[in-house]
Amino acid sequence: MSDPASLSSSREGETGRQNVSECKVWRNPLNLFRGAEYRRLTWVTGKEPLTYYDMNLSAQDHQTFFTCDSDSLRPSDTVMQKAWRERNPLSRIKAAYQALELNNDCASAYILLAEEEATTIVDVEKLFKQALKAGETIYRRSQQCQHQSPQHEAQLRRDTNVLAYIKRRLAMCARKLGRIREAVKIMRDLMKEFPPLTMWNIHENLLESLLELQAYADVQAVLAKYDDISLPKSAAICYTAALLKTRTVSDKFSPETASRRGLSTAEINAVEAIHRAVEFNPHVPKYLLEMKSLILPPEHIQKRGDSEAVAYAFFHLQHWKRIEGALNLLQCTWEGTFRMIPYPLEKGHLFHPYPSCTETADKELLPTFHQVSVYPKKELPFFIYFTAGLCSSTAMIALLTHQFPEIMGVFAKAVSMISRTCVEHL
């Protein structure tokens, strides 16, 4: 028989998974390479940076992007279809080599080896260049045959996903190896070549690379396109917009001077941008201000959650540090956001109410050794607690006096005598 503790924990796990399923989880556009980066943490500390839930989501993504119903027509693709379902990394790598034996131009096999077997970014880039050569060949063939049948159209969609993924990861390799202008060019060309592929969120990779180049005018141009009221927001968009407005005033900002003369128009715009960013994701400032330790970002994030905050701060902390006074202005103003949000917290101010399931999703996405941040609770003023306590005690005394008048009379006389004695003693 199962003990009650195991039954209760299994029920809690089922409830947690149900809550997670209600939240939309997004693929992290800046996720690291498993072999070259995530595995290094395991080698050094023995800790696993990725949760099973996170890796399971990635497996589903790989099957969606890199496979199609017509894979049975090509033996190498049939092998890779099974490889993406494998839970054991060694089994996946072995299957990728089997696919390359069947077809030396199997682009998805090179992708798997680059992601999971290569131990340095240089090796990752070499494998992705091989994948690019194979992927472009297959993509051209699919373009020529796309109108022959629905199966060929499905193949073209799959081959388009493969080619776009390869180019995006090559851009990330160039960024990590210091060839930032090359990375920016690849990203811009990719956005022009495949404009419908918005699920990759390539503009967030572009924003980070442009910030590294300190090309702030180009960053503003990208924000003007993607920080639109009809498009979904992200921490990268909101906090980058705040950083650009903070940059114009942060070097001369002083809390003492601002309290004496008041805020200028530019300072008000910067503070409002910070408040907007903090309301969207309240967990980011503690990482930027180094009040909380960073960890490796997960492969998926929950928007407005701690997982998104970790992913943003991991790459953007250096950009905030580079601008003089930016973190000082953030430290002085970010907590004011929660005084502006109406009470109760469900109402929100500039965005939709903060999702109640976010904390549960973050616990599934982030490793157990990381303490998940929760939404800051809005504290009620002291006088409200005092007034509520006074009214409650008065009502209780009135009720007791009505029910037990004689006893309460004796009690009142005793209290008055004790009080008089204390006053006389003083």
Image: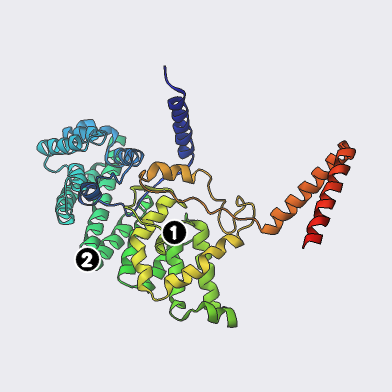
31 in relation to 152, above or below? below
Q: Quadrant of the C terminus?
A: bottom right
Q: CA distance from mark 1 to mark 2?
A: 26 Å
152 lies left or right of 107 = right
Type of the residue with mark 1: Val
Q: Which mark, by number, is residue 284? A: 1
Quadrant of the rendered image containing residue 159: top left
Viewer-nearest residue: 145 or 182 = 182
> Would you say residue 207 is visible in this rendering?
no
342 lies left or right of 286 = right
Residue 122 at x, y percent in the picture: 15, 56
Q: Residue at x 11, y 35 (%)?
A: 102
207 lies left or right of 40 = right
The residue pinned by badge 2 equals 178
Q: Residues within 10 Å of mark 1 (few under 14, many from 20)?
A: many
Residue 133 at x, y percent in the picture: 15, 51
Viewer-nearest residue: 298 or 83 = 298
Q: Residue at x 54, y 68 (%)?
A: 272
Type of the residue with mark 2: Gly
Viewer-nearest residue: 148 or 264 = 264
Viewer-nearest residue: 255 or 133 = 255
